Image: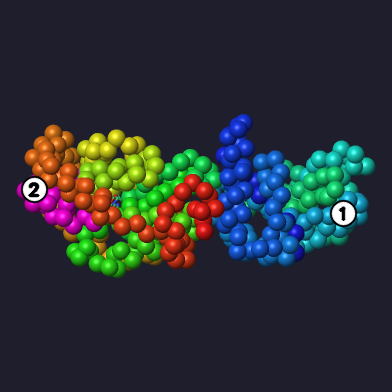
Amino acid sequence: MNYELILVRFGEITIKGRNRNRFEMMLLTQIRLALKAMPLLTFERGYARVYIRLNGEKYEAVAARLKDIFGIATFSPVMSSEQELEAIQQCSLEMMRSLNPAPKTFKVSVKRGWKQYPYDSVEMNHLVGSHILRNTPELKVDVRQPEVELKVDIQHQTTYIYCEVVKGAGGFPLGMNGKAMLLLSGGIDSPVAGWMAMRKGLRIEAVHFHSYPFTSEQAKEKVITLSKRLAYYGGKINLHLVPFTELQTKLAQSGHDSLIITLMRRSMLKITERLAEKHGALAIVSGDSLGQVASQTLGSMNVIGRSSSLPMLRPLVMMDKQDIIGYAEKIGTFTTSILPFEDCCTLFVPKSPAINPNLSLVESIEAYLGEELERLIDEAVKGTEVLVLKEDGESTSADLDNNPEDAWF
Ligand code: ATP
Ligand code: MG
C-alpha cells in the first residue's frame, strides 16, 4: 500500500500544561533529527500528535527509525482521501484489502472533526462498513472484538484513514529529564541500563574505567562500539575513558583482599561524581542488578553507594538476567557485550569478595590511604580522555552543549 502519511502519537500523556508543550516541541525536534537522512519528509504538528508526510519516502524505512525514538507511544500509517463519500468508501476498501494477513473480522469507527460533513458518524460507519462488506464477502463485522478496527477521521479538508497501530519505544523525549553519567563496563547490563535511562528522557555521558596495559585495546574498542550503539538512540555520546591502573594497583596493595572490589567501586563513584559536576549531570546510572554478584548485594550497594552523594539510578536492580539479556538483544548490544575481553574489575577479583562489607572498616582503609588516595583520584580525573561518539563514527566537536541539534550532528 502506498501510504501518504504517518500519524505519530506521543507517550506519557499524563504530562500537563507547560511541560506538555515542552515535551511536544522536544519530541518533534528529536523526530526531525533522527529522520534527517530522509529529506523529502515534511512535518505537521497537531494536538498531542505529529503528522509526517512521506512525499515519496518509504514508509518501512521511516517506521523502522520511528520505533526507536523515545517519547513516541504509537504510530500509524495513514491514507488520506478526498471528502466525497465514494472516495472515502473506496479508500477504506483499498486499505482493508491491502492487509496481510487478511483479517476475518473488522469494524469501522468514524470520527467527525468537521461537524458540517453531510453524514453523521453513525451513518458513516454504516455507509463505509457496508461498502467494504459488499466487496469482500469473506469479511464479517464484529463490533466487540474485531481483528481490525478501521479508523476514519473526517477533518475539514481531508479524511484520514488508518487501521494499523505500531507500538513505539515510549518514555520521554531524550534530554527532557536532564543528564546523568552512565557507568559503562562493556558487559551485558550497563548498556541496557543506559538505554533505559535515555528512554526516561535522560541524556547520558558514559564513563569507562580501564587498566591499560592490563586491559587490552580491544576492551576499549568494545566500549566504543557499545557507546556508538547507544548514540543511535541518543545522538552524540561523550565517552570518558578513565585511567584506573594506578589507583587500582594501590587499592590492591591495601592488604584487604576481600574488600578490593568494594574499594574500587567506591573510588569509581568518587571519580564519576567529579566528572558529573564538571559536565552538569545530576545522577549516576549503573547496570547493578540485586544479588547478581558480590558487589551487587544489598550490603555492597549500601557501602558502595555511600561514597557519592549523587542519586544512584539502577534501572535493572529488580530484573532477572534473562530479561536483561532480552533487552540487550532487542537494542542491539548483546553480541558486542559478550565478546570475551577483560574488564578492569576482573583483573583483581579476589577468591572470596565480601558480600556484606563493613562500612567502618572500608572507611578506615580509605582514611589510612588518606592524601595518597585523593591524589590518585585527582590524577585519574585529570587523565580522563573524552571521545565524542556518533552512531557511525567519531565527531569532531569537542563537547556537547544543550542544543539538541548539536547533540545529534
Ligand atoms: P555489566 O554487564 O554491565 O558489566 P556486570 O554484571 O558485569 O555488569 P559488575 O561488573 O559487577 O556487573 O558491574 C556492575 C556495574 O558497575 C556495571 O553494570 C557498570 O555500571 C559498573 N561498572 C563495572 N565495571 C566498570 C568499568 N570498568 N567502567 C565503568 N563502569 C563499570
Ligand atoms: Mg562487568
Q: In what element is the residue under mark 2?
A: loop
- Residue where numbered disc 2 is placed: 254
In the image, is residue 243 above or below residue 298? below
Identified by mark 1, the residue type is Glu
Tell whether label 1 touches label 2 (CB within 8 Å). Answer: no
Residue 366: image location, x then y, percent: 13, 40
Label 1 near ligand 1 (CB < 8 Å)? no
Q: Residue furthest top?
A: 17
| Residue 196 appears in the figure | no
Q: Earlier in the sequence, mark 2 or mark 1?
A: 1
Q: Residue at x 12, y 51 (%)?
A: 250
Q: Residue at x 78, y 52 (%)?
A: 161
Q: Main secondary structure of the magenta part?
A: helix
* Magenta stretch bounds: 243-264
- Residue where numbered disc 1 is placed: 82
Identified by mark 2, the residue type is Ser
Relative depth, front residue between 194 and 271: 271
Q: Residue furthest right?
A: 118
Q: Residue at x 66, y 63 (%)?
A: 39
Residue 156: image location, x then y, percent: 85, 44
Label 1: few (<14), some (14–19) or many (≥20) C-alpha neighbours in 10 Å: some
Number of numbered markers: 2
Q: Residue at x 31, y 57 (%)?
A: 385
Residue 368: image location, x then y, percent: 8, 40
Q: Is residue 192 left or right of residue 361?
A: right
Relative depth, front residue between 39 and 118: 39
Magenta region includes residue 256: yes
The structure's colour scheme is rainbow
Q: In what element is the residue under mark 1?
A: loop
Residue 66: image location, x then y, percent: 59, 56
Q: Is residue 4 left or right of residue 243?
A: right
